Amino acid sequence: MKVIGGTAAGLVIGGVAGWFGGQASVPTGPPVTVTTTATKPALSGDIPIGIIHAAPIEVGPETPAIEMALADINDYVAQYTNVPVKFTFLEENAEESATKAVERAKTLIDRGAQVIVGSEWSSHCRALLPLMNERQVVLISQSSSSPSLSIPDDYLFRLQPDDTQESLCVRRMTVDLGMKGVIVIYAKEAYGEGLYKEMVKKWGESGVEVLMALGIDPEKKEFIAEFGEVDAAYKEALKKYKQDEIGIYLFGTYGPDIPALTSLAKYPDLLNARVFDSDNGGAPGYVQYAGDIAAQVQFTAFAFGPSAHPKFKVWVKRYMDKTGFEPYFTAYSIYDCLWLAALSVLATQNYNGAAIKKIVPTIADSYFGATGWTELNENGDRKYPTYNIYRIVKEGGEAKWKTVGFYDGISDSITWAKS
């Protein structure tokens, strides 16, 4: 059985013809009906797919995309298959706690979920993975990227490239912008620590000096004392490098990075520095809670994202028509995660985690969605890295994210926007 078709969003599922410049080229064609050899379909009724959000702050950007996915998937099932099923989504929130993420996952499994989408955070995925492997339930994360979770033949699949790929973008951005010394503040959890360790190697290879590295508790809500140490290190660095040759890097999840910015603002000299984040570019909370500070330090970050292919543009327009604002990258990523989950279930005709796990890579290899081609590598992580680079600027007296570049992992280059 092969599943091919188009959704209301104009996405195409089919064989991939090639890859060029960070974008896949996919043959199109008329949708065909999903059929089964049995006289009675093996699947029927409501099929629950679980969703675990890492934190309340993640819900806002993703909810519209989840609603779009639910409508599009069920429309596809009704129009192009003869399978009498309806997908339903069961949502839980881990409230920034890895322990709660496991508790919420157990609840979803008890409610019948054999596939769970989430969590956004690597620390949560790390805590969830033993349970997923034991219960044989598939976990598909929209944004986890810690290299420590790049494990073959487990039950975790990730639509974000792992941090060994992300670190290439950070290095290229550092070098292109002329940074010679860096101060790193990283969250002491799977994502922050993993990226920091990768960057020590990458910066060393490029002749960039790590002037200071400071690990912080990701569950704290202020870091004023910690940034006193950063302030001292920055002043010392100015004796060796020019102001525009020093970068302050925040490596962490969405949660601790915003209070890190507000804590940094307590030290006037640090407001003259260039401050960089990792893959939180475009996240609305930065503008909402620390916009003026971020604009002053030219806060620059990136996020996984496709090149602006036609299907992506159509999807973004739908999202903006629905919400009035641009999507954060986890929004279009969770949309594709939910599609991969549903298509894998339809392909197996068996709502069983072990069976679904076997076919997810095949479906991903043949799916071109809002995020582009979703081919996975041998560890179940997205194979090709492409990132949009953003900066918070003041325009018309208001802070806003502005796209300033695009990183292509195939050529290891950034195309910077003309100012």
Image: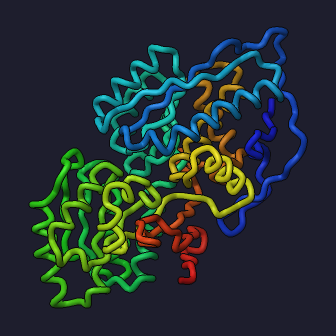
Q: Residue at position x 58%, y 31% from top?
A: 357
Vertical arrangement, residue 56 with respect to residue 23, above or below: above
Q: Is residue 203 above or below residue 191?
A: below
Question: Which one is nearer the viewer's eye here, 244 or 130?
Answer: 244
- Residue 202 is left or right of residue 186, and the answer is right
Residue 112 appears anywhere in the view: yes
The reply, left or right, for residue 286 in relation to residue 407 is left
Displayed quadrant of residue 6: top right
Location of residue 75 by image quarter: top right
Looking at the image, residue 20 lies above or below residue 75? below
Q: Quadrant of the N terminus?
A: top right
Write the residue at 90% across / 41% down: 30
Q: Nearer the viewer, residue 72 or 153?
A: 72
Name the residue at 54% across, 27% down: 115
Residue 109 location, x and y as percent?
A: 46, 19
Residue 367 rendering spot, x and y as whole percentages: 71, 45
